[in-house]
Amino acid sequence: MNQAVPPLHSINEPRKGSTTPGSDDLSSTSTPLTVYLTPGTDGSLDLYDPEEFKQLAKRIHASSPASQDGRAFRRLFYAQAIQVDMDRQGRLRIPAELMELAKLSGEVMLVGVGDHMEIWNPDQWQAYLAEKQTKFDEIAEKALAWPPRS
């Protein structure tokens, strides 16, 4: 993919909280596409399909309930995670609480990250890129170190 910057998508003001992912038309499907919207890290929201959300839930449940951080993460994550249906045009409603959490209004940036998508405030995404892009090689070396460090 040669796209340096993901395309911007708009938040529809009349139906505040709906995002329009673009020209992808889901009208050929008879049932709505169900996705899970959760708080993300670094100021984004995460969007999972049902299977990936199920896999994430298994990983969360495999963490130690004796850990204070584990309990806090479970509470924060599940208290704010919601199931949403995309409409026939591929739009979804983002609750006001999650929009505030991610500072979303006007336009949003959709970023694919493998097993899910992230929804970003474009200014926050640009700031994140500016900070991390200069460290790309260092980050890649640590993230892809083999064998994995324990």
Image (cartoon, rainbow, N blue to C red):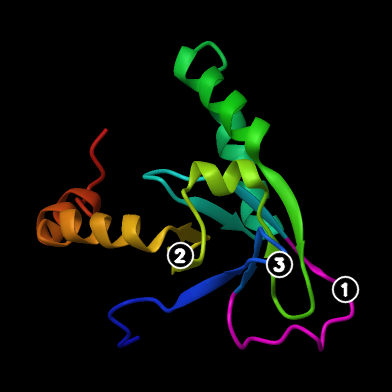
Residue 63 located left or right of residue 13:
left
- Residue 128's spot in the image, x, y percent? 26, 55
Helix, strand or loop status at disc 1: loop
Q: How far apart are the alpha carbons under marks 1 and 3?
A: 24 Å
- Nearer to us: label 1 or label 3: 3
- Nearer to us: label 1 or label 2: 1
- Point 41% across, 45% down: residue: 43
The residue carrying mark 1 is: 31
Q: How far apart are the alpha carbons under marks 2 and 3?
A: 32 Å
Residue 147 visible in the picture: yes
The residue carrying mark 2 is: 114
**Disc number placed over residue 84 in the picture, else none:** none
Helix, strand or loop status at disc 2: loop
**Disc number placed over residue 14 in the picture, else none:** 3
Quadrant of the image containing the N terminus: bottom left
- Point 48% across, 59% down: residue: 118
Specify start and end residues of the magenta stretch as a single range. 21-34
- Residue 25's spot in the image, x, y percent? 70, 87
Q: Residues within 10 Å of mark 3 (few under 14, many from 20)?
A: few
- Residue 92's spot in the image, x, y percent? 70, 64
Q: How far apart are the alpha carbons under marks 1 and 2?
A: 24 Å
Q: Is residue 22 above or below residue 148?
A: below
What amino acid does circle 3 point to?
Pro
- Point 15% across, 60% down: residue: 136
- Disc 1 vs disc 3: Cβ atoms closer than 8 Å? no
The first of marks 2 and 3 along the sequence is 3
- Disc 2 vs disc 3: Cβ atoms closer than 8 Å? no
